[in-house]
Each structure stands twice: as structure tokens, then as C-alpha cells.
Image: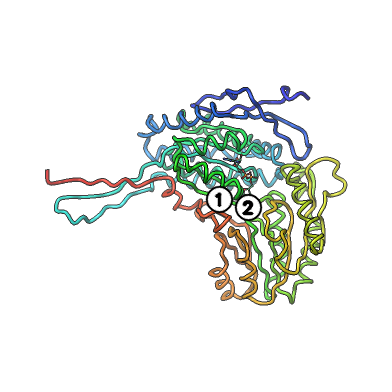
């Protein structure tokens, strides 16, 4: 099929759906079929400028005077509409990124909760009053929007990651320019359509540009009229974003990657631990999750038995068509992701790792960017595969002897996003919680989340926090007002 025969999506700028000014388009490849299924605008400088100008102008329009409760209603209308559109939005995630259809459809309820949470918070943001040292002088703060927010989104969980940015941004009265990943833009385009058509967001408050990091992402994040960049993605891109914001001095929130440890002690409920370690690294999007528990640290006394059980559980996972209700793991999002996993596994084996299962494209699947659930054992962490975020279904397991060694190994990484502790010793779990440098921790479970609970990391996992009530302070700023009551 010629590229021009593919369905084309448009971007939303100043309340109008538009083709890219440049006339350039990008094809989106379905990872399960390896075929292009649609085209999205490949926005360049002109489109980004128009989107930011529209967002900037909207800050001074009727939006500024809209009551917070009304702003919140927009988000609540979106949350209300999501269940009716869940199947359709999930179809777009499957077509663009190969996500599991059932899981993706169910996940929309989770996303709706975030939009509702921030909708309900919109009118609960308040300032402070001060006891001033001056007679007759009062002082207080009220909170105002930060300005134009650039929301830059990765491909693996686009709608949820958008909800954590758009929710507090809209509730706080900001205007936005959203830039989804070029690998998974259509679900974002479609939710923006819902914001526009169903939730009735005023013109210019939300704008959408699609395209590649260069130039689209760079132009957006360095634009002089952008006041805040809310970014989720990889650490290398984050370094570019920080450099870009040297131009506009925009505030940043950076939610980045991880190489998260799951620590299993010999007193753990092992059935529960196996289930959570397997779910923690292979579920979600076939390991393409920022919190994937991709390093299993297992106490030496149970190491062999536990790894055998992990291998059996991994081999029982059904890899296949993401649209099939039987499939537990679909393809990876791109061929580059598959090649990255293949190369990393080959390099690890050459360096002395033992490949226990997987490490290749699963047999019997003629097409699609599939990679089998993979488990390697390594004797220590001096292996590149123990340090690099692969963003694929690859687990490395290594033994430790005692609690002190487990903590040392867990922290021996440049990342610090998530960690799981499996033990029935509560005192030990709490000691680990203090000692392990990870912003999200689970004890005897993994991967739970909810809008009121913040997420975020340390080091190369980013230094910010997203979610929770506190996000309302990230998306509003205090203005201090002094009043002379003596006149
Ligand atoms: P990525 O960093 O390649 O891309 C993220 C976004 O940044 C995309 O929209 C991309 O087009 C844009 N971009 C790329 N270069 C840019 C530039 N120079 N300037 C501005 N924008 C630019 O990430 P990805 O491959 O889409 O996603 C995977 C990464 O995201 C992983 O590292 C994963 O761990 C991380 N992630 C983190 C979280 C979290 O909450 N901490 C959640 C999901 C994913």
C-alpha cells in the first residue's frame, strides 16, 4: 500500500484539526504485523510555534476567568466518557505499540481515575495567610497557573502518563502543548479529540503536535513561551531536555527509566514472590515498563530453587497476537527494541551469564517484533546487562547472602525508580525501605498504583515526583499579596 493511502490523523492547534504545515508525515508501524497502518503529522518548527502561541494566548482568554470547579468539571467529563471509549482507545495502543488489547482496555479505568482525581482537586488548592510584623498590613498567597506546559510523553503507557500531567495542569489553570511519542501517537490524538468534543475544553487550552524528538520535541521544549516541561522518557533524552530548557529556563519534571531490583529473602512466601517477580518484569507491555523489576536479587539459600520456578513460570507465558484474549505478552514496540534485547543477551552470555530461558524471537511467530520472556543468571553485578535499562522482557537474577549485601546490590546502580521486597520479616522490610534508594517501593507485592500515591525516582530515574495531591503545587505557583488596611 502506498503511504498516501493510509489513514491520516491530524493535530489540534488553537481548537482546529490541521494537517502539518510542512506537509510531512510519519508512518506508524503495527509491531504485530510489521506493517504501516496510519500516518501522523511530522510537525516541524511552524506547527510547534503555532501550538505554543495558541496555548500562550489562551492563558489570557476566558480560560483565565473560568472557576476552578468548572475546570475540574472538564476533567470529570473526560473521566466519565473514558469507559465508553476504552475499547477504541485500546485499539489505537495495540495498533501503534503492540500492547495487549485486554490489558489496555482494562487500563482505561485506571487512567479515568487519574483524570477524575485531578478534576475533583481543582477547587481544593489554597494559599496561605501570614501574620505580618506591620500594623494594619495583611499578606496572603493565592496560587496561579505556571503558564504553558509542554507535556512530552513516551510510547509505553501514553494515556496514563498523559493523565498525570494533563490532570494537574488543567486543574491548575495552565494551558498545554502535548507531544506524544512518534511510536504511539494515535491514542493521545484520540483522547485529545475526547477532550475537545466531549469534555469541551475551551479553544487553545490544549494543543497537540506530533513528530520526532528532533525537531518537534526540541523546538517545543526550548520554546521561549513554554514555562514548564513535564517529561517522561529515557535518561538520555532527559539530558537533551534539560539542555533545551537552558533556553527558556522552564521548570521541569523528569520521570525516567529504571533497572529496578526485586529482593527475595528465604523467608518469603515464594508462591507470591514468583507471581510478582514474573508479573513485575514481563506483564504490562512485555517488559517495556519504567518500573519493570528487571533485577532479581535472590537469597543464596533459595537461589537455585527460586530461579527454576521463575524459569518454569516464564516458559508458561503465552506470547502472541496482542489482540488475542489468550496472549499474555505481545510484541515489543519496534524492531530496534528487539535488536537491543538480542544484542544485550548475546553480550551477557559472552561475558559469562547463563541464559536460562528465552533470549530470542519465539518460534512459530512468522511476523511481529516478538521477544521471548528471558531469564539470565549472573554471579555478580559486573555485567552490563545488570546496569542497562533494556526496556524489554529480560530478567537477570543474582544471589546475595545477607540483608547488607542485598541493600548494597540494590543501590549499586545509577537508577532509583522502583524496588520490591519479598520477606515475611516486617522489621527487615522496613529497614530495606529506608536503605534502598528507590522512589516507589512494594513489599510482598509489585506494580500497584493509584492517583493519590506519588511516583518518581532518584538519579538517572529522575528527581521529580508525579501524581498525588502534591502535583497541584507543581502546576501552580504562589503569588504573595500585601494589603494596606490603614488607608
Ligand atoms: P524517549 O526518551 O525516547 O522519548 C520520550 C519522548 O521524548 C518522545 O515523545 C520523544 O519523541 C521525545 N524526544 C526525543 N528526543 C527529544 C529531544 N531531543 N527533545 C525533546 N523531546 C524529545 O523514551 P521512549 O523510548 O519513548 O520511552 C521509554 C523510556 O521512558 C524508558 O526509559 C522508560 O523507563 C521511560 N519511562 C519512564 C516512566 C516513569 O514514570 N518514570 C514511565 C514510562 C516510561
Looking at the image, which residue is at 58% across and 58% down? 417
In the image: residue 44, left or right of residue 400: left
Instruction: Compare residues 76 and 7 and report the one nearer the observer.
Output: 7
Q: Label 1's element?
A: strand
Label 2 CB-ligand 1 distance < 8 A:
yes
Q: Quadrant of ligand 1?
A: top right
Q: Is residue 400 left or right of residue 77?
A: right
User: Are the residues flagged by discs 2 and 1 in contact, CB closer than 8 Å?
Assistant: yes
- Count residues near mark 2 (Cα–Cα under 10 Å), then give few for <14, some for 14-19, many for 20+: many
Determine which quarter of the picture holds residue 155: top right
In the image, is residue 407 above or below residue 18?
below
| Disc 1: which residue | 255
From the viewer's perspective, is residue 298 above or below residue 286?
below
| Residue density around tag 1, few if under 14, some if 14–19, many if 20 or more, within 10 Å | many
Q: Is residue 307 above or below residue 74?
A: below
Q: Could you tell me which quadrant the C terminus lies in?
A: top left
User: How far across and how far down the image is residue 24, in percent?
Assistant: 64, 25
427 left or right, relative to 469:
right
Location of mark 2 (residue): 290
Q: Position of residue 261 (x, y in %)?
A: 65, 63
- Label 2, secondary structure: give it: loop
Count of marks placed on residues: 2
What is the CA distance from the residue labelled 2 to the residue labelled 1?
Answer: 9 Å
Q: Earlier in the sequence, mark 2 or mark 1?
A: 1
Q: Is mark 1 within 8 Å of ligand 1?
A: yes
* Left or right: where 359 falls relative to 136: right
Amino acid at each position: 500500500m502506498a503511504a498516501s493511502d493510509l489513514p491520516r490523523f491530524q493535530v489540534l492547534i488553537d481548537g482546529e484539526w490541521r494537517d502539518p504545515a510542512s506537509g510531512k508525515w510519519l508512518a506508524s508501524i503495527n509491531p504485530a504485523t510489521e506493517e504501516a497502518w496510519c500516518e501522523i503529522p511530522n510537525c516541524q518548527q511552524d506547527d510547534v510555534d503555532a501550538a505554543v502561541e495558541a496555548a500562550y494566548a489562551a492563558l489570557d482568554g476566558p480560560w483565565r476567568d473560568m472557576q476552578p470547579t468548572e475546570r475540574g468539571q472538564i476533567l470529570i467529563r473526560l473521566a466519565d466518557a473514558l469507559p465508553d471509549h476504552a475499547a477504541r482507545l485500546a485499539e489505537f495502543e495495540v495498533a501503534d505499540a503492540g500492547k495487549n488489547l485486554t490489558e489496555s482496555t482494562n487500563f482505561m479505568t485506571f487512567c479515568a481515575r487519574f483524570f477524575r482525581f485531578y478534576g475533583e482537586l481543582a477547587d481544593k488548592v489554597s494559599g496561605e495567610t501570614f501574620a505580618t510584623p506591620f500594623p494594619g498590613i495583611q499578606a496572603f498567597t493565592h496560587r496561579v497557573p505556571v503558564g504553558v506546559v509542554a507535556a512530552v510523553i513516551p510510547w509505553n503507557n501514553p494515556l496514563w502518563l498523559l493523565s498525570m500531567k494533563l490532570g494537574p495542569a488543567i486543574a491548575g489553570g495552565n494551558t498545554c502543548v502535548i507531544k506524544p511519542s512518534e511510536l504511539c501517537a494515535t491514542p493521545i490524538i484520540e483522547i485529545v479529540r475526547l477532550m475537545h468534543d466531549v469534555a469541551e475544553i475551551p479553544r487553545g487550552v490544549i494543543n497537540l503536535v506530533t513528530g520526532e524528538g528532533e525537531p518537534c520535541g526540541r523546538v517545543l521544549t526550548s520554546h521561549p513561551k513554554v514555562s514548564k516541561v513535564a517529561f517522561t522518557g529515557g535518561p538520555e533524552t532527559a539530558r537533551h531536555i534539560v539542555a533545551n530548557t537552558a533556553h527558556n529556563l522552564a521548570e521541569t519534571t523528569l520521570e525516567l527509566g529504571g533497572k529496578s531490583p526485586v529482593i527475595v529473602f528465604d523467608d518469603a512466601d515464594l508462591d507470591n514472590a514468583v507471581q510478582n517477580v514474573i508479573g513485575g518484569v514481563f506483564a504490562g507491555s512485555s517488559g517495556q515498563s519504567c518500573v519493570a523489576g528487571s533485577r532479581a536479587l535472590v537469597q543464596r539459600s533459595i537461589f537455585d530453587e527460586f530461579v527454576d520456578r521463575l524459569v518454569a513460570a516464564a516458559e508458561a507465558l503465552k506470547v502472541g497476537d496482542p489482540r488475542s484474549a489468550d496472549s499474555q505478552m505481545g510484541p515489543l514496540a519496534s524492531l530496534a527494541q528487539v535488536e537491543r534485547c538480542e544484542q544485550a543477551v548475546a553480550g551477557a552470555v559472552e561475558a559469562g551469564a547463563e541464559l536460562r530461558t528465552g533470549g530470542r524471537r519465539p518460534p512459530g511467530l512468522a511476523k511481529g517484533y516478538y521477544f521471548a520472556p528471558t531469564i539470565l543468571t549472573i554471579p555478580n553485578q559486573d555485567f552490563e546487562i545488570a546496569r542497562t535499562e533494556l526496556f524489554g522482557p529480560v530478567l537477570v537474577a543474582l544471589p546475595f547472602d545477607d540483608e547488607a549485601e542485598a541493600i548494597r546490590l540494590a543501590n549499586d546502580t545509577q537508577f532509583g525508580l522502583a524496588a520490591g521486597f519479598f520477606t515475611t520479616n516486617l522489621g527487615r522490610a522496613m529497614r530495606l525501605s529506608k536503605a534502598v534508594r528507590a522512589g516507589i517501593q512494594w513489599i510482598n507485592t509489585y506494580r500497584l498504583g493509584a492517583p493519590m500515591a506519588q511516583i518518581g525516582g532518584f538519579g538517572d530515574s529522575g528527581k521529580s515526583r508525579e501524581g498525588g495531591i502534591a502535583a497541584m503545587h507543581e502546576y501552580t505557583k504562589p503569588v504573595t499579596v500585601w494589603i494596606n488596611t490603614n488607608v
